[in-house]
Image (tube, grey):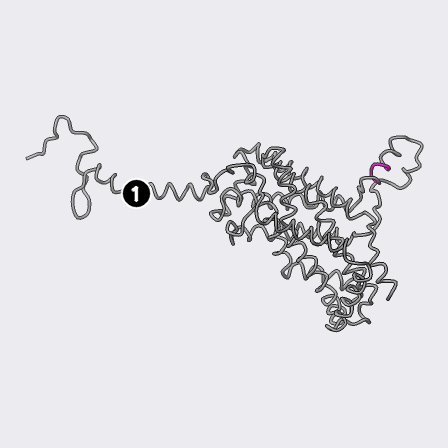
């Protein structure tokens, strides 16, 4: 006959017909639980809900005072000591031999004269590296600030981040100074273009041909991201955004080195009868607020927002970072709300504005370079 259910039996204990036999719902749920748990864990990893890196244990970790900081500090101290202690004549001799090495390697004087080589490549890239280091504390302080760090930690990271990029910046601008003259000569011969056109093409080709990856490592390491935390998927987002920022930032400031800043306000305001116009011109002149400033600050804001998202997610989730995590941060910011995402975008624009101001001011200074000046006169 008909099977009776025990008086205290629960509905979940009813037999459930299945292919190949009959299982109770309790047994079915027991077998499905591991699958549900694994699926939930996979969703958590994908959505970025669980950070992979633990919070810093002390101020040394929070300030990112690590081996990279000490290495960069030692290199910068060595470079400063060498420039101060090596006799002037010895520095001049080294610079002259450097020019001779370019000629030995095949750089023609017909394409690029000694004066141009010294001024547009060796001197300009040396000063460009210096200017980046001068402006970098502003960048790393503000990046830490917009991601919710205390003022003390922001100050520490401003220094440690700058020191950590010293070796990479030295390699970046040193390699650029060596390769750019040959690339310019190549485009002059192949395309029959002028020096100015060929130099611009060469700079862009070098940036896109490999230097952009060096710049990516510079920024990520400066912000404290370890090599083990970097992922291929993050570079797929980071590098295109970096190319856009480089076009409006590095190339603009590199070309600007040593040039006089022309205020963005009308020139006639300098002697205007209205006080506010004279003050506006004086302020723009003092702070070097020119067209290049707006190109560097506002023109790179959108790209920097993407770069900040990648950097922050790599710092918090490490090599478990997914593109979904990055998109989530772009939309929802640090606190996972739309308001936080909007505030984060505004903070990024503020960050680029102040960093652009510091960088633009450094690039606009008439830095004295007596060794380069003597080398130019000697040629």
Q: Position of residue 291 (x, y in %)?
A: 79, 45
**Residue 283 forms part of the magenta stretch:** yes
Q: Position of residue 158 (x, y in %)?
A: 65, 41
Q: Left or right: 196 with respect to 45? A: right
Question: Residue tagged by mark 1?
Answer: 34
Identify which residue, 95 or 241, lies in the foreground: 95
Q: Position of residue 52 (x, y in %)?
A: 46, 42
User: Which picture quadrant has residue 14?
Assistant: top left
Q: Which residues are magenta?
A: 281-285
Q: Which image quadrant: the C terminus?
A: bottom right
Instruction: Please report the residue visible at 71 percent of the width from the left and 64 percent of the height from the top.
Output: 178
User: Which picture quadrant has residue 29?
Assistant: top left
Q: Left or right: 114 with respect to 251? A: right
Identify which residue, 39 or 178, lies in the foreground: 178
Tell me the chief SS of the magenta region: helix
Instruction: Please report the residue visible at 60 percent of the width from the left and 45 percent of the height from the top.
Output: 223
Q: Left or right: 213 with respect to 248? A: left
Question: Local crowd at mark 1 within 10 Å, few (<14), some, or many (≥20)?
Answer: few
Instruction: Please report the residue visible at 89 percent of the width from the left and 34 percent of the height from the top.
Output: 278
């Amino acid at each position: 006959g008909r099977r009776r259910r025990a008086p205290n039996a629960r509905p979940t204990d009813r037999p459930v017909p299945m292919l190949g036999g009959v299982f109770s719902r309790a047994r079915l749920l027991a077998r499905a639980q591991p699958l549900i748990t694994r699926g939930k864990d996979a969703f958590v990893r994908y959505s970025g809900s669980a950070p992979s890196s633990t919070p810093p244990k002390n101020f040394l970790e929070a300030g990112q005072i690590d081996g990279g900081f000490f290495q960069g500090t030692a290199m910068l101290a060595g470079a400063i000591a060498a420039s101060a202690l090596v006799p002037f004549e010895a520095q001049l001799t080294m610079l002259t031999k450097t020019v001779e090495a370019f000629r030995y390697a095949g750089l023609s004087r017909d394409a690029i004269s000694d004066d141009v080589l010294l001024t547009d490549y060796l001197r300009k890239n040396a000063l460009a590296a210096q200017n980046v280091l001068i402006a970098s504390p502003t960048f790393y302080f503000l990046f830490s600030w917009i991601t919710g760090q205390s003022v003390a930690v922001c100050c520490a990271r401003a220094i440690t981040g700058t020191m950590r990029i010293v070796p990479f910046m030295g390699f970046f601008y040193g390699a650029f100074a060596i390769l750019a003259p040959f690339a310019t000569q190549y485009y002059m011969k192949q395309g029959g273009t002028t020096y100015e056109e060929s130099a611009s093409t060469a700079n862009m080709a070098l940036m896109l041909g490999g230097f952009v990856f060096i710049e990516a490592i510079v920024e990520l390491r400066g912000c404290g991201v370890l090599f083990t935390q970097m992922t291929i998927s993050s570079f797929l987002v980071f590098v295109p955004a970096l190319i856009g920022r480089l076009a409006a930032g590095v190339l603009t400031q590199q070309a600007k080195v040593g040039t006089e800043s022309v205020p963005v306000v009308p020139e006639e305001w300098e002697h205007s009868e209205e006080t506010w116009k004279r003050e506006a011109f004086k302020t723009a002149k003092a702070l070097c607020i020119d067209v290049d400033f707006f190109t560097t600050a506002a023109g790179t804001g959108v790209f920097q927002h993407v770069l900040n998202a990648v950097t922050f997610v790599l710092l918090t989730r490490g090599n478990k970072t997914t593109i979904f995590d990055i998109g989530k941060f772009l939309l929802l910011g640090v606190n996972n709300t739309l308001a936080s995402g909007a505030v984060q975008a505004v903070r990024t624009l503020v960050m680029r504005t102040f960093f652009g101001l510091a960088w633009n001011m450094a690039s606009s200074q008439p830095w004295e370079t007596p060794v380069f000046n003597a080398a130019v006169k000697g040629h």
